Amino acid sequence: MVLVVLELVVILALLAALAWVLRNSWREGDPAALPARQRAELAAAIEQARWVPAHDEVDGVTRVMVRRAYVALDGRPEVLDERVLETFPAQDPAWEARFTEAMSAARFRCTYLNAEEAG
């Protein structure tokens, strides 16, 4: 009998811990659930969002893009918007030249977009 009660206590404790984790993970994604001070800090961080050049490789294709990002409250970058400017095969013989040109275009576009938002 004592063993059954002990097992029930352990199961209830695990369920309570799981509910707490789920509740907190849902709240992290909801800015309205943040305290007023953190909401203000988040709003200020988003206000400072800037366009930055970026690139990645997906399924053997290099993508050069611009991203509008800010530093989140946890210190990690958060992407608000992403626009792919150019794609080309990662195995392209002229990959380096294409990549260099595309990144240059992305940097120019970021300068333009950031100036537009500042003005």
Image: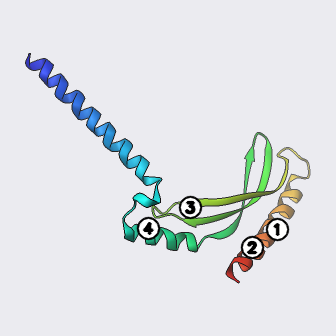
Residue 98 quadrant: bottom right
Q: Earlier in the sequence, mark 1 or mark 3?
A: 3
Precedes in sequence: disc 4 or disc 2: 4
- Pair 4/2: label in front: 4
**Tag of residue 77:** 3
Residue 79 percent across, percent down from the top left: 61, 59
Q: Which residue is mark 1?
A: 104
Front one among 85 and 104:
85
**In the image as oriented, which residue stretches furthest toward the front?**
32
Q: Which mark is residue 45?
A: none
User: Dot 3: few (<14), some (14–19), or many (≥20) neighbours within 10 Å?
Assistant: few
Amino acid identity at mark 2: Leu
Near mark 2 (Cα within 10 A), the count class, few <14, some 14-19 or many ≥20, is some
Q: Secondary structure at mark 1?
A: helix
The answer to whether mark 4 and mark 1 are in CB contact below 8 A is no
Give the amino acid at mark 1: Ser
* Foreground disc of the pair 4, 1: 4
Of labels 1 and 3, the one closer to you? 3
Q: Which residue is mark 2?
A: 113
Camera-nearest residue between 73 and 25:
25
| 76 relative position to 97: left or right | left
Q: Quick one: which residue is furthest to the top in this view?
A: 1
